[in-house]
Image (spheres, rainbow, N blue to C red):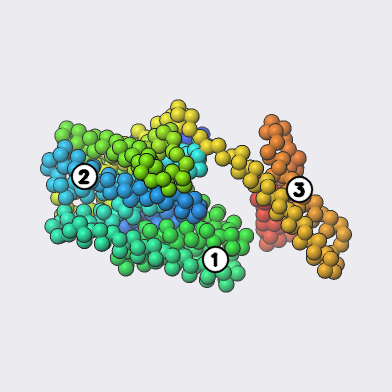
Amino acid sequence: MHGPELILLLLGALLVTAAARRVAAPAPLVLVAVGLVVSFIPGLPEFELEPELVLVLVIPPLLYSAALDSSYHNIRANMRPIGLLAVGLVLATTAVVGWIAHVFLPDLPLTAALVLGAVVAPPDAVAAVAIGRRLNLPRRTMTLLTGESLINDATALTAYKVAIAAALGATATWLDSTRTFAIAAGGGVVIGLLIGVGVCKIRAVMHDGVMESALGMLVPFGAYLFAEELQSSGVLAVVVAGLYIGHQAPKSSYYTRLQDTAVWRSVDVLLESFVFALIGLQLKTIVADVEITPALAAGAAVVLVATILVRFAWMYPAAYLPRFFSRRVRERERAPGWRGVTVLSWAGMRGVVSLAAASALPLELPGRDVIVFCAFVVTVGTLLIQGLTLPFVIRKLGFHGDEEQADALAEAQVQHAAAQAAVDRLNEVIEEGDQTPDHVVERLRMLAQHRGNAAWERLGRQDDESPAASYRRLRRTMLDAERQVFVEARDSGRIDDEVLFRVLRELDLEEAAISRE
């Protein structure tokens, strides 16, 4: 893929994403569908998926960004179910799908079939999380989806390496495989934690938001490459570093937090658009590289069905058996409802990791073309079948979160206490002899009271505009008027662009502070 082709692909993917977001459609699914259609346009250059590009330059920043936004407390509180999904389910999928592929595709040796199982084992939660947020899934369900997606790639890629070694004739016992997995996982966690701690300490003494953000952008690539160089899990290193740095973010400056949020959201949109468009565009290349016989098509379809069903077969026992056998689990965790288990079972779409892993297979691997074709069928099939029907399943089951009112009440209580603490601190400073004019002090008191009251007002009637909402609406109107005056002054030559940019930033920060999604 050459430079101009890459730019055209990125531009086209962004335009499709923008159109999908405008009509509230799940952008990843739209991108895959459009890519499938576009791949057969005559004269279109072939867009080959380069595994090194995806595994080093795409997956680490996406995982890191997701980890930054994840709740360490929520993930820690749900480590048992997340572990059952991200480790247990991945290994079970590898074994079951591998055995079924060997049975229905006899030309595929068992060791190579297990490679296929490892390739399609890890779900990609990008599409599921996007749909879940739009349809207000419960927070615990979103935590399980996100936590699973952060860890399962490490499990699958480790199983993938072991399976490839076995398929190529390398002797490896179960003990050797378990030891390799433990060392890779443990090393990834330690390296990620060390990098996270080190980066936070360095950023704490920088006092420069731009440099802090620049350093943060190196973390996913450095953590991944450094861990892989030490035969550890680069994926786990990236995830652990992101979780730690995200957990420590409140200690950073406001400038760093604002900049990091803007930077990583832009990176997410760009990379997600790129990879899902690339998935659809692979159809032409993959079809050209393999002779598709009725037996192969039927076998690939069976592998697709098995990949979907094994998740259901795992989810229900994993959700209820631990509660049956352990009183501690019953006391510590709320019983999962069957609706939530069903939604999680259906949210098993595969993504670019599966295709990248398949494309990176050694050329001498037995049945390589069959594995690549089946991986493509599973990836696209789960994205289109499960992804397109997941909103219907969620709505049909009536499964949605009920945390909004509780969150609003908790926020109002804490915001009231925070406003009172701010006023108390202001009074202490004034009593110590501060010479600030009275009208400024009164304005500060009113601002604190306004912030304290605003959260309570949001708990009131939703059909009437609250005073806080009226304040925000009118203040935004005033800020627009101020911007217009400064822009006109710049255009007429009364002020320089540098003055305009400085004032616009001050106005933008104020609007960001008063705006609520």
Residue 278 at what x, y percent from top left? 35, 46
Find disc 1 in the rendering and name its residue: 212
Which numbered dot is residue 98?
Answer: 2
Find disc 3 in the rendering and name its residue: 450
Q: Are marks 2 and 1 in contact (CB under 8 Å)?
A: no
Circle 2 sits in a helix, a strand or a loop, which is it? helix
Circle 1 sits in a helix, a strand or a loop, which is it? helix
- Hey, what amino acid is under mark 2? Gly
Q: Residue at x 43, y 60 (%)?
A: 240
Relative side of 335 to 172, left or right: right
**Quarter of the rendering containing residue 288:** top left
For marks 1 and 3, the one nearer the N-term is 1
Q: Residue at x 84, y 55 (%)?
A: 442
**Quarter of the rendering containing residue 495:** bottom right
Circle 3 sits in a helix, a strand or a loop, which is it? helix
Viewer-nearest residue: 88 or 208:
88
- Hey, what amino acid is under mark 1? Glu
For marks 2 and 1, the one nearer the N-term is 2
Cα–Cα span, label 2 and label 1? 45 Å
**Quarter of the rendering containing residue 454:** top right
Cα–Cα span, label 1 and label 3? 33 Å
Instruction: Please identify the quadrant where the C terminus is shown.
Output: top right
Q: Is residue 478 visible?
A: yes
Relative side of 74 to 359, left or right: right
Q: Which tag is nearer the camera, tag 1 or tag 3?
A: 3
For marks 2 and 3, the one nearer the N-term is 2
Relative side of 156 to 339, left or right: left
Which numbered dot is residue 244?
Answer: none
Q: Residue at x 35, y 33 (%)?
A: 385
Residue 378 at what x, y percent from top left? 29, 40
